[in-house]
Structure formats: C-alpha cells, structure tokens
Image (cartoon, rainbow, N blue to C red):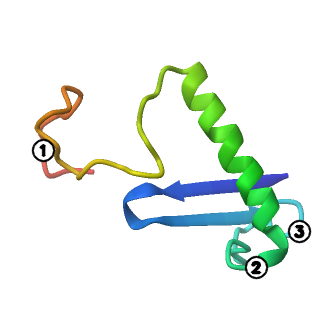
C-alpha cells in the first residue's frame, strides 16, 4: 500500500510505503527507483479528478488567491 501526496503550489510530491513504513517516516519521492510508480499514481490522481469534476490543475496551480476563480472563499485566518 502506498500513500502519495501532492503539494501543487510547493511543486512537491511525497511517497510512503505504508506496509514497510506505517509511521510515514521515510519519504521515497526522491528515490529514482520509485519514479515510475509516482508517475502512475499521479496519472491515477488525474483520472480521479476528472471523475469528480475537479478542474484544479496540479501541474500548473493558480496563485493562492486568484480573483478569476469563483470558488475562492475569504479566509478567516483559521486553518
């Protein structure tokens, strides 16, 4: 089992092997051995985005606050 995380604005991806590393201590994303797996997981994520009508472009994200995007909500300062 794998956990693949994408931070589009930071242009960062993280990969964990949850069977060997259940506490998520070893990020495998910089290991070339897992490059094809990460590419496959990213492709799967994009397919899922289409299925869910999620038009967010993880490869080219808009600025954090883009006035042309209607989905923007005013931030309350709380996370």
Q: Which of 29 and 75 is in front in this view?
A: 29
Relative to residue 34, is residue 76 drawn left or right? left
Q: Where is residue 3 in the image (x, y as percent from the top left)?
A: 71, 55
Relative to residue 62, is residue 58 drawn left or right? right
Q: Position of residue 61 (x, y in %)?
A: 36, 49
Binning the other alpha carbons within 10 Å of mark 1 as few (below 14), some (14 to 19) or many (20 upward) gives: few
Q: Where is residue 65 in the image (x, y as percent from the top left)?
A: 17, 47
CA–CA distance in space, label 3 to label 2? 15 Å
Residue 20, label in figure = 3
Between label 1 and label 2, give the one nearer the viewer: 2
Q: Nearer the viewer, residue 49 or 23?
A: 49
Circle 3: element type:
loop
Q: Give the image quarter of residue 37.
A: bottom right
Label 1, on which residue?
A: 76
Q: With respect to residue 31, does 37 lie above or below?
A: above
Residue 31, label in figure = 2
Residue at (49% x, 20% y) in the render: 53
């Amino acid at each position: 089992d794998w956990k693949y995380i994408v931070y589009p604005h930071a242009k960062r991806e993280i990969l964990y092997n949850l069977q060997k590393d259940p506490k998520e201590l070893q990020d495998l994303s910089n290991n070339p051995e897992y490059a094809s797996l990460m590419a496959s997981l990213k492709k799967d994520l994009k397919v899922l985005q289409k299925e869910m009508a999620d038009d967010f472009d993880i490869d080219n994200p808009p600025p954090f606050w883009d006035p042309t995007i209607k989905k923007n909500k005013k931030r309350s300062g709380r996370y």
